[in-house]
Amino acid sequence: MKQLSKTIIIAGLTALVTFPAFGQSFEAGWEAANSGDYATALKNWKPLAELGDAKAQFNLGYMYSEGQGVPQNYNAASEWFRRAAEQGNTSAQYYLGKIYKDGQGVAQDYSEAAKWFRRAAEQGSALAQYILGKMYKDGQGVPQNDNEAVSWFHLAAEQGSSLAQNSLGNMYDNGRGVPQDYSEAAEWYRHAAEQGYVLAQHNLGMMYQGGWGVPQNYSEAVSWFRLAAEQGYASAQLDIGIMYSRGQGVPQNYSEAAEWYRRAAEQEYASAQLNLGNMYNYGQGVPQNYSEAVSWYRLAAEQGYDLAQYNLGIMYENGQGIPQNYSEAVSWYRRAAEQGHDLSQYNLGSMYRDGKGVPQNYSEAISWLRLAAEQGYAKAQYNLGTIYGNSHGVPQDDSKAASWYRLAAEQGYASAQFNLSVLYWDGEGVTSNPVMSHMLEILAAAQGIENAKTNRDIKLELLSREQIAEAQRMATEWRVGTPLPYYDDFTTWP
């Protein structure tokens, strides 16, 4: 059975000074409560509370809120807290605010909660200051105001509140209510982390991992992640697993990585479930086991994690760890695609294009491929080009084909570079430009496209020395991710 909090003990000791006539009764209640004899504590404190002793009223409210010596009764708790709070009892003001915030024994009322938290905060309650700051940060019961939030967090943090120190670190980290300052953020995270606050330990680890506000130091990052992970914090368990997987700050160790992923995964942390599934899929740190991979992917996928839904779709499409089922693959690709996952949009479009798991439907295929292509996925851009260029379910449109090929080609997609080179040679969908065609052949050939090598060599016999030189120069100077030349950029054609 829980003992009364330290707040009650302090309240009792103060009451001895305020109400000497009842000192023995209050002290007896305090001793009884701390020995677990709540019935005796109630017997001693209730008369004091009814006579108006604010500290006895608070203690009585606490007993009702916790169900200590009396049936738990939030209505009674709120009444006793209110009596004490109206007399200026700081602890009662805080707990009355909490009751309104949580809607226990009273209708939930954030404004009323903020009122009572403010009264306690103005009397120096660090916990009330922290919660009032949080309410300003979230706009809960008060107008959203990051500056006010920072002010209250500061007051609580300077009293040593680890919750407030971590929150203040977050405000500096994100530049909310204060200029963004990673060094200041790291310092406040450190104050809280050194008190053992798990979120701050993880946050400080992140700062060392990224080199934000502190020199990048993977070993330090691992140390702080480990402290949080050993307290059971799933995000830290995931991150220390990633560090072992990458060999950052620790020797690379897939077995250790898998173990930390498992700890987080067993807490239903979707990212860890995905990572553990990947370990089983590829046999890293654990024996390769497609069925286990599917199990972990499914757990993450059912939480709505798009990457896991995508991976689960692949397992169904390929029949790995589960019977091959194109319809199931389509179902999981669709869930991820509807969240905007580009690879899933591409795969779903491909299933419609090929009639796998769904009736063949080029219109649907184009819709999903376009969504992926518009996010910059080169393979989708290339496939859209082939659909328009080969009139698959749509009228042939070489201009649209060329546009999509160009986007993929600019990302270095070799097949798109080759197809675009053919269009430039034939003048289909674009203005004919043999020099541009040769440049693209050179790029595609360098990536091993055999047809591009053949065409490149043929052009050496067909183009002038100047044209060949210009195409070679442009191919050498061009960089992946930059625009390809346009018609006016050439001097040797027409």
Image (cartoon, rainbow, N blue to C red):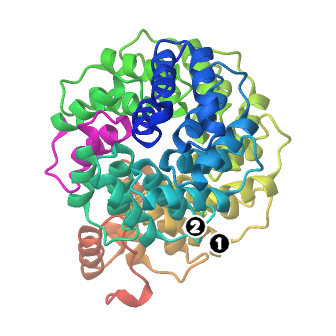
Using the rendered image of the protein, determine whether residue 392 is visible from the camera's viewpoint: yes
On screen, residue 100 versus residue 373, left or right, reads right
On screen, residue 397 versus residue 6, left or right, reads right
Circle 2 residue: 404
Disc marking residue 217: none
Report x, y in % for residue 224: 25, 34
User: Does the segment drawn in magenta span residue 422?
Assistant: no
Of 445 and 334, the residue lying toward us: 334
Residue type at mark 2: give it: Trp
Q: Are marks 1 and 2 in contact (CB under 8 Å)?
A: yes
Residue type at mark 1: give it: Lys
Circle 1 residue: 400
Of 486 and 471, the residue lying toward us: 486
Secondary structure under badge 1? Answer: helix
Outermost residue to the top = 287
Q: Quadrant of residue 441?
A: bottom left
Residue at image location 39% in from the left, 33% down from the top: 13
Of 122 and 452, the residue lying toward us: 122
Report x, y in % for residue 187: 21, 52
Q: Quadrant of the C terminus?
A: bottom left
Report x, y in % for residue 71: 73, 22
Q: Which residues are magenta?
A: 192-218
Residue at image location 58% in from the left, 57% down from the top: 116
Q: CA distance from mark 1 to mark 2?
A: 6 Å
Q: Quadrant of residue 319?
A: top right
Using the rendered image of the protein, determine whether residue 418 is visible from the camera's viewpoint: no
